[in-house]
Amino acid sequence: MAILIDERTRFLVQGITGRFGRHYAPRMRRYGTQILAGVSPGHGGEIVDGIPVYNTVADARAHHPVDAAIVLVPGPAAQDALLEAAQAGLSPIVALMDGMPIQDMVWLRHRLRHSATVLIGPNSPGLISPGRSVAGFIPPQSCCPGPVGIVSRSGTLTYQTAHLLKARGIGQSTAVGIGGDPVVGTSFVDLLQRFQADPETEAVVLIGEVGGTMEEEAAAFIRAGHFTKPVVAFVAGRSVPVGRRMGHAGALVMGRRGTHASKVAALQEAGVAVAALLTEIPSLVAARLRT
Amino acid sequence: MAILIDERTRFLVQGITGRFGRHYAPRMRRYGTQILAGVSPGHGGEIVDGIPVYNTVADARAHHPVDAAIVLVPGPAAQDALLEAAQAGLSPIVALMDGMPIQDMVWLRHRLRHSATVLIGPNSPGLISPGRSVAGFIPPQSCCPGPVGIVSRSGTLTYQTAHLLKARGIGQSTAVGIGGDPVVGTSFVDLLQRFQADPETEAVVLIGEVGGTMEEEAAAFIRAGHFTKPVVAFVAGRSVPVGRRMGHAGALVMGRRGTHASKVAALQEAGVAVAALLTEIPSLVAARLRT
Amino acid sequence: MWLTEHRAKSLCRDHGIAVPDGELAATPAGAAAAARRLGCPVVVKAQVAISGRGKLGGVRRAADPEAADQAAASLLGTRMDGQPVEAVRVESYLDHGDEFYLSIGLDPTQATPVALVSAQGGAEIEDRAGAWPDLLARLAISPVDGLRPYHGWQLVTQARIPAPVRAGVVQVLQAMYTLYRDLDALLVEINPLAVRADGEVVALDAKILVDDNALYRQPTLAQERRLSSAERRAAQVGIHYVPLEGDIGIVGTGAGMAMANMDQVTHFGGRPANFMDIGPGILRGGARVALEILLERPDLKAVLFSGYTAGPLERVARDILAALAAHPQRALPVVVRLQGHQDAEARALLAGASDPRLHLEADFDIAARKAVQLAQSHTVPPWPS
Amino acid sequence: MWLTEHRAKSLCRDHGIAVPDGELAATPAGAAAAARRLGCPVVVKAQVAISGRGKLGGVRRAADPEAADQAAASLLGTRMDGQPVEAVRVESYLDHGDEFYLSIGLDPTQATPVALVSAQGGAEIEDRAGAWPDLLARLAISPVDGLRPYHGWQLVTQARIPAPVRAGVVQVLQAMYTLYRDLDALLVEINPLAVRADGEVVALDAKILVDDNALYRQPTLAQERRLSSAERRAAQVGIHYVPLEGDIGIVGTGAGMAMANMDQVTHFGGRPANFMDIGPGILRGGARVALEILLERPDLKAVLFSGYTAGPLERVARDILAALAAHPQRALPVVVRLQGHQDAEARALLAGASDPRLHLEADFDIAARKAVQLAQSHTVPPWPS
């Protein structure tokens, strides 16, 4: 089954005439991703790699039965593009670019909080359901179909992990890079819920990072019994000096959460196997898969 | 039954320490309206006519089981006060003061569009369920209990009409002044729906004004069969020179609606008896009441 | 509050919308000097907030400064549709091709801002849009989201604005929405937005209506507001006065009551001289100021002061007596009907004053009819000028 | 980007929050002159964006201009917590009573701004709030609604701010939210907000953190940003460089990969000299600038360039060769591991260059271990200064 996207998902690409759009759109299509249309204001009528370009999402939707969006517009224009896609009812919306102002994203999350839209990112490498569809920067050759779901806050580590698993002969159901920004549209917990419901997924690899509390929330979710499949985790940034802390608000808001140690401890208390090095992940996964 | 408010409705009054609050709060209480608390930021701890005053709605609610709000703060502070009441879950919220910037109200209507809050006004005289409860400026002695609902865009004409009916021996179930501003929280149609469902109401008097399209919408609602009780209407402003029209947007947005003639014609086509003078209303109503 | 075209255009330019260069002139010589500075041909435009100004002759083309002088002379000091022409805008005449219609306004039915765009602008937009509704692209704007660039692109695509100028029109729409929001406007209209040979889009006319309720947070605009001294006195005590051309003065408690009074006076054959809403009578001195403004109008033959309120009618009655006492020479009949809170006390106070100008009535209709009768039988005495 | 206290306070004052009078001084003499102008006693405060500045001696009281001169002399030119002290703020010392804590910050867990208020402010707020959570009033703010006056009143009521100063604190909270929103801030913190004898509330310290992603729309602040030339070069090509104190340079494709590289180097006994994220390798010249910045650092003993990307690795390889070619004298070993799109072509290009400094590896772990080994066996040759 995979989660979120498969070979039937029909995408449009916002920002298709930019450098990233022109580089990635053809590569995704070649893998099999259904990209029916592109959107770039002022470029309506152009063609990119055989894909027709429109000025607005509304115009593209009037001509093509698209379900989902891949968003490759730069950070300053990201809120507009994501709102446009959400208002057109597209889902999932995969926001790949970095540089989106954090308040723009906070506003957008609030704005869409009662909406059914699934927003991945921003600053995400995208996601892949191997053998079916890729939306974003993940190199498809790093992956192969199989029973392991990947959720990751890091872009490159998403496919580095897939690559390590593939080298060990372990394929993936879906690999999702949720995005490296402090506020993103979809959390680890959101994706664990989907992987729990996906019969094809037998285990999940979770790649966290220092900062924020998303790993602690995932640990609490697992500990509460809402996710029952094996989880292997890695938390990047053990050697990263704690960001220069100034002011008291951070500590008052976050309490003792957010550090490498707090995340590893919370995950371990939830029964998650935490790898010290990324390269340890495949054997930890292999030991936990049904054979 | 009456609609919206009755003897069990428990109010707080926002702006109770202002001139309007001090004048009207005691009068409403004397009529029997349950006013449990007042709110005026910076006046927490004071007492107005035996009513304890708090700094915030949240604080008042923490001490008293209030359901509904009467809002007597001036226009510039109205959006804050109405949002505060709505976020506290109060309903109905009766906004009495004029001078609220129209964009503030447009924003608020949009903000509350998925909320169950009933917002009457702004620039409303309030409403009365005679013999039970009054919220606002309507002089209770103008009314008496009975089978006729009143909905009015004009404040004074609400009670002038009630007074004329009372002189004829016809009482009211509930009389509601929806407010004289171009954008208000509750429309004629909203109230017709409530009067339709109210077994005590046998007929409705609708007092319109030139401008806007609310009378035309009410006419369409009645014509479509959604309101089946007798309606008598009066549209004020026949002699008012059409406001200086400038620009084309008004005509492009409104089409041919909004004039005295268009409103009277629409209502008459819906089977509504339209009075040429306010004083004709009682006999038109009397002729249509079940005897 | 309507802004003048000149003010609206300077705001447009501040927000990045191109407008023709132009200057305000209050004298023919000033218009000629402006034409010299701007370079001819110029257009001389009466600065009055009326509709159909062009058809009424309020816009004149001038080939040289002398023609500008003459055009200004023929406009300044006249009245157009009742409005005095106190200034003209002299602006460069621009050659252009297509004319578009753009507006951001309030749709009271949907309680939302609405953007309208047509590729066929100009004075006949209403008729054309009536005949061919497809010419008009229309989009409701969420006040929370605002008008985004993609909304602009939707509008220009739907309105079939020619592709080469779409990006420019989208920018104008965004600037218009910013004006609409930041000025607390009820309407921002550009008609026409003209396309020049180089593809630049220029606003040849601009109309902006600002919400009076929001003027407290638009101090610059509020200062520029032009009110008569009577309107200003009324506004200062929080009452609403609009002078009209009849001879029966009207005071009502609330806008609806004021309108109903006007309707009744008209119904019985009289002509209302104004709209006056004093609210529920809570405002100290409001009733007094209202009546004094009417007593000071030499053209009135009667006043109908008719209201119903839960406000303090005793104070209203005292206000009425104070106004009459302040104008002992003014032999103007004043019909008073007061109902509501303290109406017995108020009537007693008024009756006790024994002022022959006062006519107390209890019935809504009879009071109006009485005012009409008094006006018809009344000869206006000479008014000390 | 952290604003200096001086900048933060001038923004506070612009938004109506009272702050002590103060001046920036870059020399002891300047500090003394400022003290003379302000009137003594004054406080001399090191302008460094660190926590616990007071405990580290960065805040000195001076009874007269000479003491201010000495305090500035003892601070300027030193480093506090790694940060150079380049300026001091000299400000009037204010007698005061209560000290409150106020902040508007981002709660990343709830993805919402959050306001915090405590009647017990000061440097120990964290410990106190840990021990007595009731001391801290907390309210999530909707970014659509903003922080309204009633939110402020809820906070001051819950935090038991004394009644006489509540209205003043509510005003400060609203100004702080305006700053937070309009500056694209991630944190606006005032600690302490002090109460003077007359009831006025004054911000004695202010910290503001601005979102780097939003600096494009904060041009004034962006201009004031202080970056080293290397950080500036990196930012210009859109890559992210943070220098650290180790000796192994790190380049990663993406922030997570850069962090994982640092973790591995640490794991195998090395010390990362930096964080460097070049993204997926799409940005022209990004890899070249990244490597050149590291080649130009005289303190490095090895570089680990390790990445995985669907970007064009051929171009990345050419960038690596160009960087090495531009620094032919720099005998720094560079371990390269590249996986992903075009990795075979990239490896062939690099191998073909036969640069003895280049060490190609295919395995993630082995590459990191190799970099550590090379750094340990490496003697840094003299660097032409």
Image: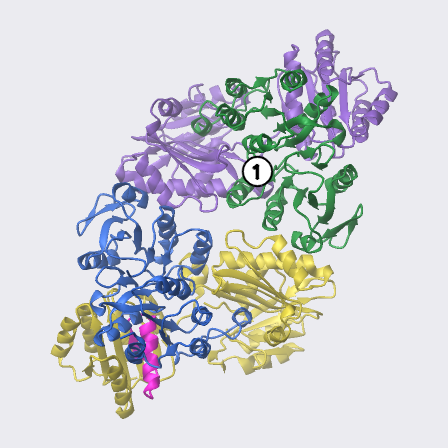
Chain colours: A green, B blue, C yellow, D purple
Please name the amino acid that badge 1 sits on.
Answer: Gly
Which of C356/A279 is in front?
A279
Residue at the extreme left of the image, as rendered? C352
Residue at the extreme top of the image, as rendered? D377
Q: Is residue D150 visible?
A: yes
Res C368 quadrant in image: bottom left
**Quadrant housing the N terminus of chain A:** top right
Q: Within the magenta stretch, is there residue C283?
A: no
Residues drawn in magenta: C250-272
Does residue D74 sit above or below C101 in this rendering?
above
Which of A282/A122 is in front?
A282
Instruction: Give x and y (percent) for residue C37.
Output: 63, 69
Instruction: Give x and y (percent) for residue B154.
Output: 34, 69
Res C195 quadrant in image: bottom right
Res B70 quadrant in image: bottom left
Q: Which residue is mark 1?
A: A185
Which of B32/A179 is in front?
B32
Does residue A273 sit above or below B276 in this rendering?
above
Does residue D108 sit above or below A107 in this rendering?
above
Badge 1 density bin: few <14, some 14–19, many ≥20, Cα 10 Å: many
The chain identifier of the residue carrying mark 1 reads: A
Residue at coordinates 43% horizontally, 43% vertically from top-left? D15
Which of C20/C35 is in front?
C20
Instruction: Give x and y (percent) for residue D152.
Output: 36, 41
Instruction: Give x and y (percent) for residue A78.
Output: 62, 43
Q: Circle 1 — which element?
A: loop
Does residue D312 sit above or below A80 in this rendering?
above
Position of C160 with respect to D347 (left or right) is left
Q: Within the magenta stretch, is there residue C258?
A: yes
Position of C8 with respect to D274 (left or right) is left
**Quadrant housing the C terminus of chain A:** top right
